[in-house]
Image (cartoon, helix red, strand yellow):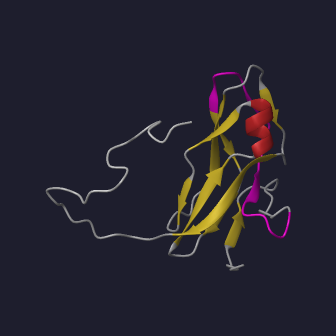
Amino acid sequence: MKKLKIQVQKLHEAAKVPEFAHSDDAGMDLCSTEGVTISPGEYKAVPTGLAMAIPEGYVGLIWDKSGNAIKRGLKVLGGVIDAGYRGEIKVGIINHGTEAHTFDVGDKVAQMLLQEVAHADFEEVESLDETERGEGGFGSTGK
């Protein structure tokens, strides 16, 4: 497994430096620095109190904690942390559940994955090559 060195700045005394719960986990946990309640249908930005220096050529992608998503209907909104960003990482969360949910200080709110980034040179063309799938979109491959 590839290891990166990431500089992390704590912007709040309650901030927790991200950790991997298990040695083979893909995502590192991000925790709240404030008590935040999100009512059904509401969305809020939950502060982590952290800023990071993600190396050039990488991106931090913020994803749901599976338990929060499945058990509570909490979904992360957005979540692309570019290598050049040095501000506080906040986690946008919407509550699709039926009950309000409160994150207390120190609670795990999301997980971040680090991934390599590829850039492309785009070439405008009149048409694209043919493939077996073609223009088949949503539901085109069956159940």
As drawn, 140 above or below 21:
above
Q: The magenta stretch spans which residues? A: 22-43
Q: Residue at x 80, y 33 (%)?
A: 71
Image spot of residue 77 (x, y percent): 58, 41
Residue visible at 85% across and 61% down in the picture: 21
Rendering coords of residue 14 (x, y %) = 82, 53
Question: Closer to the camera, 121 or 100?
Answer: 121
The C terminus - image quarter: top right
Asked if 94 appears above or below 33 in the picture, the reply is above
Q: Nearer the viewer, residue 6 or 131?
A: 131
> From this viewpoint, is residue 32 visible?
no
Name the residue: 67% across, 58% down. 112
Q: Nearer the viewer, residue 34 or 26?
A: 26
Q: How many marks?
A: 0
Instruction: Please determine whether, in this image, residue 69 is positioned above or below residue 99.
Output: below
Prevalent SS, magenta region: loop
Quadrant including the N terminus: bottom right
Report x, y in % for residue 47: 69, 46
Residue 26 spot, x, y in % from top left: 72, 63
Drawn side of residue 86 relative to residue 136, left or right? right
Q: Tell me if residue 79 is in the magenta stretch.
A: no
Please say whether residue 9 is visible from this viewpoint. yes
